[in-house]
Image (tube, rainbow, N blue to C red):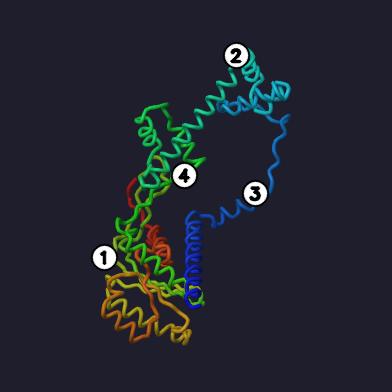
Amino acid sequence: MALNHDKALAHGLERDLHEVSRLAQRVRRGDYNAGALRKEQLKPDFMEPVPAGARRRMKKRAPLSVHERISIVHQVLVGLEKQADVAKDHRVSPRVVAALMHKAKRNPSFMREIMAKVDAKEEQRELIKKAVEVKNDFGYIIDSAQAVVADLNAQGGEQVTAGTVRSVMREELGMRFRKIKTVSLHSNSEKNLVLRQRWALEFLAQARKKKVFLNVDETWLGMSDFRRMKWQVPGTTNSVAKLEVAPRVTMILGLDTLGNVYAALAQANSNSQMMELFFRSLAARLDAQRPSWRRDTVIVVDGAKYHQSKDFLAVAAELQLPYMLLGPHSYDAAPCELVFAHFKRADVNPRHEPTGKR
């Protein structure tokens, strides 16, 4: 019975971990921002198709696909539809339909030739699909459709185009061309993946107990303006006034899931002594606010060296700090990182002085 219970618990933790990962992906993709939600609400539940008689011929239309040509010939010869109606249905001119019918009537093997083209195109797309899947399975980076084209064309056979490769990757494999996000070489090593998974399972276990999570982290500010881009007026320079801060300012921040913010600024580099002072002040503040905080709160810190030093461990034991270390490279699980990113994209220069350059 105990073994079955452990298996069920492990299965539940794995399921929860998978759901959290999917939710994090959707948040990073922007599915829950205000603009995306507003667009989703404005979408009609059902889109009425445009009646064939009301369709207009498009001025710039892509060439008819093989399937569209087969459909046009079938509608006229088998369905006995009028050429003008078929032209409206496919948004082409009646001359295009007439030209297709002329070819079909003059050449009895016209349809067979079209079907042969369909089969050849399907075989080519299947070949491209398998080649891309092999690259994905082996973890190759496909940075351009031309890379796949070069590999396939080197094998001989019918030449493929970059447009066909992009079409297969988008429509059949659901791939998208996105900006590469660089990560540390060792951030996704086997050891770090295991450590992150262990942390996630422990986090879910604490969340089930309705614990309050308090993330504590630190950063430094070495200048007053971190902005990197702006709209430039023609004939002017793109310069802004920047105040160098020396020695740089250290910001220590604490954010909890109740919405409380605890912050400290110091014009010095962060070290174990500074962190000790912050945690002593934090413990005193929490003792005054919620005397029972040690039973219902977990302090989450990253794996910096001074968070694992003997001095910090002694202070944590003295203050009875209920803390846990983040998994390595778990930036998405640290809300303090979002606040730091805001500061490092902003202008914190109080004077807004011009540079004097024109």
Residue 47 appears at what percent x and percent y? Answer: 68, 43
Q: Residue at x 52, y 25 (%)?
A: 117
Residue pointed to by mark 3: 43
Camera-nearest label, 3 or 2: 2
What amino acid is at disc 4?
A: Arg
How packed mark 2 is, by other alpha carbons closer than 10 Å (few <14, some 14-19, many 20 or more), is few
- Give 214 or 120, whichever is nearer the viewer: 120
Looking at the image, is 101 positioned above or below residue 50? above
Work out how far the residue at label 2 is from the one at label 4, CA to CA, in angstroms. 42 Å
- Label 2's element? loop
* Camera-nearest label, 2 or 1: 2
Query: Which residue shows up at 49% across the image and 54% down it?
Result: 29
Residue assigned mark 2: 107
> Which label lies toward us, 4 or 1?
4
Amino acid type indicated by mark 1: Ala
Label whose residue precedes the other's in the sequence (3 or 2): 3
- Secondary structure of residue under mark 4: loop
Q: Quick check: 210 left or right of 49?
A: left
- The residue beneath circle 4 is 176
Compute the Cα span from label 1 to label 3.
Answer: 53 Å
Between the C-alphas of marks 4 and 3, the distance is 23 Å
> What is the C-alpha distance between the residues marked 3 and 2?
47 Å
What is the crowding at mark 4: few (fewer than 14 residues within 10 Å), some, or many (at least 20)?
A: few
Marks 2 and 1, how far apart in space?
A: 84 Å
Q: Quadrant of residue 154?
A: top left
Which circle's residue, 2 or 1, is located before the other in the chain? 2
